[in-house]
């Protein structure tokens, strides 16, 4: 594997773990705000981001590369409302989408065909993740200041169960 490709995959491993870190911090903050459902959703998302990091980690090993784990930074999740939280999440996902696209461009440029194949999954996954977060933001906006609406959304978010064992 080309060195520049190996370096870029290692950077992406760091980004996926960083996303996981952001979601886990959000989970803690939601617990603090007593949104148990959203806290659980964020915890599931933490798990999902870890699986993304591991996909790249395993890919590197299979290709004879070496995962080189980098430092994570302390996430800033000082939000006070679910709307703010999911907007932070959407911003993070959009950032990761463009990183995945940049990585794809590198794979094309360096003629790394197997990395391109791996990235097809990630490109689709980013569409799904952005879509899911956008939908949640729309529901929260519809609920507006209604405490009852937010209560129901929180309950629905908490029903995101079982995925932890699926992946
Ligand atoms: Fe991810
Ligand atoms: Fe993500």
Image: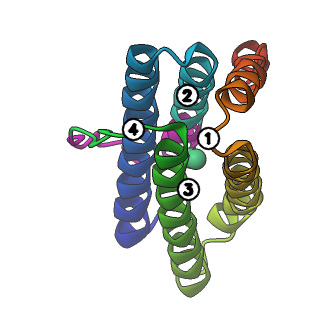
* Residue that mark 2 sits on: 42
* Residue 72 position by quadrant: top left
Distance in Å between CA atoms under marks 4 and 3? 12 Å
Q: Which mark is residue 90?
A: 3
Can I make out residue 81 in this image?
Answer: yes
* Residue that mark 1 sits on: 145
Q: Nearer the viewer, mark 4 or mark 3?
A: 3
Task: Identify the secondary structure beneath mark 1.
Answer: loop
* Pointer 4 or 1: first along the chain: 4
Q: Nearer the viewer, mark 1 or mark 2?
A: 1
- The crowd level at tag 2 (other Cα within 10 Å; few <14, some 14-19, many 20+) is many
Residue in front for this viewpoint, 37 or 152: 152
* Residue that mark 4 sits on: 22
Task: Identify the secondary structure beneath mark 3.
Answer: helix
Distance in Å between CA atoms under marks 4 and 2? 9 Å
**Whole-percent x, y for residue 43 in the image:** 54, 21
What is the span of residues highlighted in magenta in the rendered image?
52-73
Q: Is residue 153 found left or right of 17 in the rendered image?
A: right
* Pointer 2 or 3: first along the chain: 2
The answer to whether residue 17 is magenta is no
């Amino acid at each position: 594997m080309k060195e520049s490709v190996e370096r870029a995959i290692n950077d992406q491993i760091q980004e996926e773990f960083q996303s996981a870190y952001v979601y886990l911090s959000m989970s803690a903050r939601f617990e603090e705000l007593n949104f148990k459902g959203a806290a659980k959703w964020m915890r599931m998302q933490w798990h999902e981001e870890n699986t993304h990091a591991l996909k790249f980690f395993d890919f590197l090993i299979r290709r004879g590369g070496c995962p080189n784990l980098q430092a994570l930074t302390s996430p800033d999740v000082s939000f006070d409302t679910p709307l703010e939280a999911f907007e932070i999440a959407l911003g993070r996902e959009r950032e990761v989408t463009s990183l995945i696209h940049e990585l794809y461009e590198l794979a094309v440029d360096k003629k790394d065909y197997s990395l391109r194949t791996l990235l097809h999954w990630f490109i689709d996954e980013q569409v799904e993740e952005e879509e899911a977060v956008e939908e949640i933001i729309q529901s929260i906006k519809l609920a507006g200041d209604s405490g009852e609406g937010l209560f129901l959304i929180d309950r629905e978010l908490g029903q995101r169960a079982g995925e932890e064992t699926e992946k």
